[in-house]
Amino acid sequence: MDVLRVEVVYALADAQDVVVLDLVEGAVARQALADSGLLARHGLAIEDLQLGMFGKRIAAEQRLREGERVEILRTLAAAPSEARRGRARRSR
């Protein structure tokens, strides 16, 4: 049975929590997340999470390949357009 190495990442405002896992080939993102221990460590519920890879959303059932990095996406503090307006106001 082939093994693949993947990373699962949860990025906070001031730090990253990165877990490297060896999973069996054919593993999906949900399995990597469950095996990482990040859910318990950060008090997260898998039903409430959105996952990503390279900044793009993925399904929890997406099959993983060697070297991929599953990201736990956080909700934005502000909409991008509101953040731009706020920066523009402060720069005047």
Image (cartoon, grey):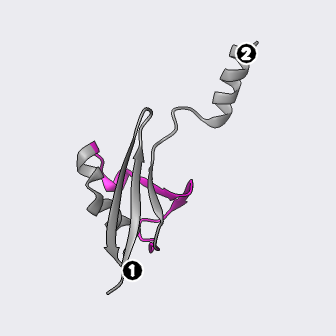
Residue 83: image location, x then y, percent: 63, 29
For marks 2 and 1, give the CA distance: 50 Å
- Local crowd size for mark 1, using a 10 Å CA cut-off: few (<14), some (14–19), many (≥20): few
Q: Is residue 62 above or below residue 40?
A: below
* Label at residue 43: none
Q: Residue at x 33, y 64 (%)?
A: 21
Q: Residue at x 25, y 55 (%)?
A: 37
Residue placed under numbered mark 2 in the picture = 91
Q: Indicate left or right for 26 with 36 as reference.
A: right
Query: What is the three-letter code of the residue carrying label 1?
Result: Gly
Q: Indicate left or right for 18 with 77 as reference.
A: left
Q: Quadrant of residue 85?
A: top right
Residue 38: image location, x then y, percent: 29, 51
Q: Residue at x 48, y 41 (%)?
A: 75
Query: What is the three-letter code of the residue carrying label 2?
Result: Ser
Q: The C terminus appears in which quarter of the rendering? A: top right
Q: Residue at x 50, y 57 (%)?
A: 52
Q: Is residue 50 above or below residue 41?
A: below
The furthest residue to the left: 40
Instruction: Label 1, secondary structure: give it.
Output: loop
Instruction: Label 2, secondary structure: give it.
Output: helix
Q: If you read the primary sequence from the N terminus, does the residue marked by circle 2 or circle 1 appear first?
A: 1
Q: The N terminus appears in which quarter of the rendering? A: bottom left
Residue 67: image location, x then y, percent: 47, 67
Pick the residue in front: 52 or 17.
17
The furthest residue to the right: 92
What residue range appears in magenta? 42-65
Residue 51 belongs to magenta span: yes
* Label at residue 26: 1
Q: Are marks 2 and 1 in contact (CB under 8 Å)?
A: no
Residue 10: image location, x then y, percent: 40, 47
